[in-house]
Image: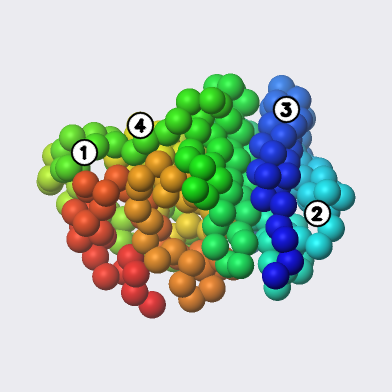
Amino acid sequence: EQSLDLDARYASARAIAQEAARKGMAYYARREELIVEHKEGNLQDVVSAADQEIELFIRAELARLFPEDGLLGEEGGGADLGARCVWVIDPIDGTACFLNGLHNWCVSIGLLVDGEPVLGAIADPNHDELFHACRGRGAFVNETPLKVSEATHVGQGVMGTGTFHSKGKGNFIPFLEKLLAEGGMFFRNGSGALMTAYVAAGRLIGYHETHLKSWDCLAGVVMVKEAGGRINDFFRNDGLLHGNPYLVAAPGVYEQLARMIGPSLDGD
Ligand code: 2AM
Ligand code: CA
Ligand code: CA
Ligand code: CA
């Protein structure tokens, strides 16, 4: 079996995410000048030159360092997805926040090895937080180790939740009603990657979206697992390419949340 330099990939993921986040801050400072396009006629699904140019930067760096690896990015699509290592990139997660001057956006870079999420880096330049994890080595924010919440009931903490893609949208209000009925509290900041990292950090007890894309969560999923959390069967049925319903949570509340969401969570 061909040897794999995971150390180099982990270090590069962190360095490139940080550098891309620095570039993001320069665009953020002049966000009012950026030309904004709407995707598929959805007025909320926005993309700017910052998204496109930062993704090109990340792809070029990864292709230069690891020319045999595959790439999948929100803006640039997939290339060499049959490769042993596939990078999954969201150049700006939280573009709607970014363009509106809300500080909740980040750069997310994750890596699949043989189809499994193995490492991730999420850089949030507004809060000077770099979340990162590599399988078997723990999860961190900057140098501090991460651990999921110890909550055993949804009434004991804050739950992340949201809905964006039209798929599954009808399941959102029923979930929210059940959460509130159980004494839960909800939070959303517009970045699926940061919400996922916050679960790993124990700031949120869990995070559920009725439908999420793999580039929103792949890097964070490694962090949640390394920090002791659980994830649903998100990658089933081509979830990597098309997305699926999503739940990450602390182990003490995972089952309770999965029951509230119902069979849509891991169904077809
Ligand atoms: P994006 O900024 O990379 O498009 C889940 O909420 C995901 O949906 C977010 O991580 C975000 O990724 C995307 N999204 C796009 N527009 C959104 C909006 N107006 N509000 C919330 N999420 C949005
Ligand atoms: Ca987007
Ligand atoms: Ca995203
Ligand atoms: Ca994005």
Image position, residue 31 (x, y; %): 71, 29
Q: Secondary structure at mark 2?
A: loop
Q: Is residue 48 above or below residue 24?
A: below
The mark closer to the camera, 1 or 3, is 1
- Give whichever of 162, 18 is nearer the camera: 18
| Sooner in the amino-acid sequence: mark 1 or mark 2 | 2
- Give whichever of 112, 79 is nearer the camera: 112
Pointer 2: what residue? 66
Residue at x-position 60% and y-position 41%:
121
Residue at x-position 27% and y-position 49%:
251
Amino acid beneath label 3:
Arg
Q: Is residue 237 visible?
A: yes
Amino acid beneath label 2:
Phe
Pointer 1: what residue? 151
Label 3 packing within 10 angstroms: few (<14), some (14-19), many (20+): some
Q: Secondary structure at mark 3?
A: helix
Per the model, the C-alpha gap separating discs 4 and 3 is 25 Å
Per the model, the C-alpha gap separating discs 1 and 2 is 41 Å
| Sooner in the amino-acid sequence: mark 4 or mark 1 | 1
Pointer 3: what residue? 22
Residue 180: image quadrant is top left
Residue 188 shown left or right of residue 34 in the figure: left
Pointer 4: what residue? 203
Q: Quadrant of the C terminus?
A: bottom left
Q: Is residue 38 visible?
A: no
Residue 98: image quadrant is top right
Amino acid beneath label 1:
Ala
| Sooner in the amino-acid sequence: mark 4 or mark 3 | 3
